[in-house]
Image (cartoon, helix red, strand yellow):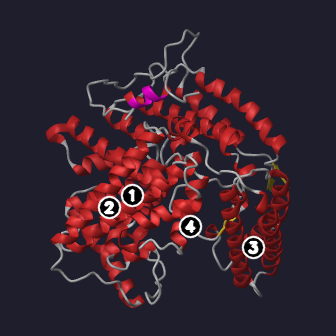
Amino acid sequence: MTVKLAFVGMLALGTGCSTQSPRHSEKRARYADLVALYHDWRIFEQPKMNDGVPDYSATAMTAQHATLAEYQRRLTSMDTTGWSVHQQVDFHIVRAEMNGLDFSQRVLRPWARNPAFYVSFYPSRSDQPAREGTVPAGAIELWTWQFPLTPERAAELATRLRTIPGFLKQARGNLDGNGKDLWAYGIESIRQQSVDLAALSARVAGVNPAVDSAAQQARVATDEFRVWLEQQAPSKTGPSGIGIDNYNWYLKNVQLVPYTWADEELLMRRELARSRATLKLEEDRNRKLPVQLPISTAAEYTSRFNSAVTEYMVFLRDHDVLTIRDYMDPALRARAGSFSPPDRPLEFFNEVSYRDPIVMLTHDYHWIDLARMDAEPQVDSIRRAPLLYNIFVTRTEGFATAMEEMMMHEGFLDGQPRSNELIYVLIAERAARALGDLHLQSNDFTMEQSRQFAVDWTPRGWLRADGETVAGEQHLYLQQPAYGTSYVIGKIQFDELLNERARQLGDAYTTRRFMDEFNAAGLIPMSLIRWELTGNADQIIAMTRPDSAGVK
């Protein structure tokens, strides 16, 4: 592997140590200068709007990319000598966001390569700080509208819906990609938007006529766009992945992950083997216990889910895992969801949660994260808003994955030994789909091969080849490089961080102290949290060296 395990003391950088070379200037930059640049940058990053329709034309995107260099110059000209670690971490957050736009302009080009980019209507909330994948500016997040609609909110929603036909008309002139899989699976995403718009129209029929009319017009435009995509599809014959060199650049410069494609491939194979082997040992240990069967009724599911939330919160408090806040219990309890009777094949995560709702509650730390963002916003503005380009995923998805196994080791599942098996089923599925992510992007796999690989290597046959889960996951990972690997990579980074911080603290270590420090750092890349908690910047230094592979 190209990245070696770093120990505290090998490169101990304390507060005020800059990762940048000293510069001779009339005066050093102030942190306030970074905040000012950040606000300018966030305005610039958004595309121009024409009557509510974002402009992703080739002309507009070329102009934006040309101007980006000036923002990057303003950033790199800052001498951060003397800044606190917290402030330097913020500097690298802004740097990563700017690199994210650069990568989107040079490589991803979703507005030109990816028909699914033109989905701009989302009925339900994401469990992430910002919606996963590449999403256009001005997308309608329907869950932010409270029903029944007030006249003012109905008028606003109708106005927003009326931008969809114009956006889809623009798409026909913007899309010039040749990626076969991006095109084919993008058609299905557009088809789903039509279904979602139809559901909205039915919901407001006879109540909000303006919204009903605008939704119907948006649906007609969506269906016409789908037909156009289907007509173009036979001519799309090329690969859809970005290639290994681009993947490596993206990991280091945008996601701030200290690994390469090859490192991640090796780590995923190791985690897949570890989880499947451990699952077999757990199954053998539990072979005399009753088989875990899925919940069979909605009433039983609701009862067990609410009992699980109560049990979980009591465990976190009594075992001093972290500081309990008032918003945590309701944040989890609100995620009960709907129950699908198991008289038909279940989707993968229902196979897990219908056997023991407690298990997926550990991963649902996402909702605690989101509630914390609302209740305890970061004081400084740079961390208050969700990071762009899904830069948060090693923290959000990685830690949620780590929390599953962490709580098992803390003893949370001691009373349900069969549920330990579920933890390893989950890890195996995530490692398998991550390998699909990697080989999609290297163009070794097509989407069908990626899906089949994940199905074949997920234990118990629970990831169905004909299910929505595998199709949706692998399509997301094709569109958003490094998302599929972030669950396991972020977990590995969390394990390294806990080890390093515990070694620093010695006898002063407690899980509660560590977790409170960890949560306070915010939803930022794991490598930056490590620097902030340990003072060790070796990973960031390595990723920003001029001779570092792939660094621009």
Image quarter in which the C terminus is found: top right
Do residues under tags 4 and 2 come within 8 Å of each other at their CB atoms?
A: no
With 350 as the anchor, is 210 left or right in this view? right
Tell me the SS state at disc 2. helix
Q: Name the residue under label 4.
A: 471
Give the image location of residue 34, x and y in percent: 57, 30
Measured Cα–Cα span from mark 1 to mark 3: 36 Å
SS assignment at label 1: helix
* Residue at figure coordinates x 33%, y 79% from the top left: 355
Q: Which label was assigned to residue 154? A: 3
Give the amino acid at mark 4.
Ala
How many numbered discs sit on the rendered protein?
A: 4
Q: Residue 484: x percent and y percent?
A: 49, 54
Q: What stretch is highlighted in magenta?
A: 539-543
- Depth check: give the residue in front, 192 or 368: 192
Q: Is mark 3 on a helix, strand or loop?
A: helix
Residue identifier under label 1: 400
- Is residue 323 something that shows in the picture? no
Residue 75 falls inside the magenta stretch: no
Q: Do the residues labelled 1 and 2 touch (CB within 8 Å)?
A: yes
Distance in Å between CA atoms under marks 1 and 4: 22 Å
Give the Cα separation between the discs numbered 1 and 2.
Answer: 7 Å
Query: Which callout, 1 or 4, points to the residue nearer the camera?
Result: 4
Residue receiving disc 2: 404
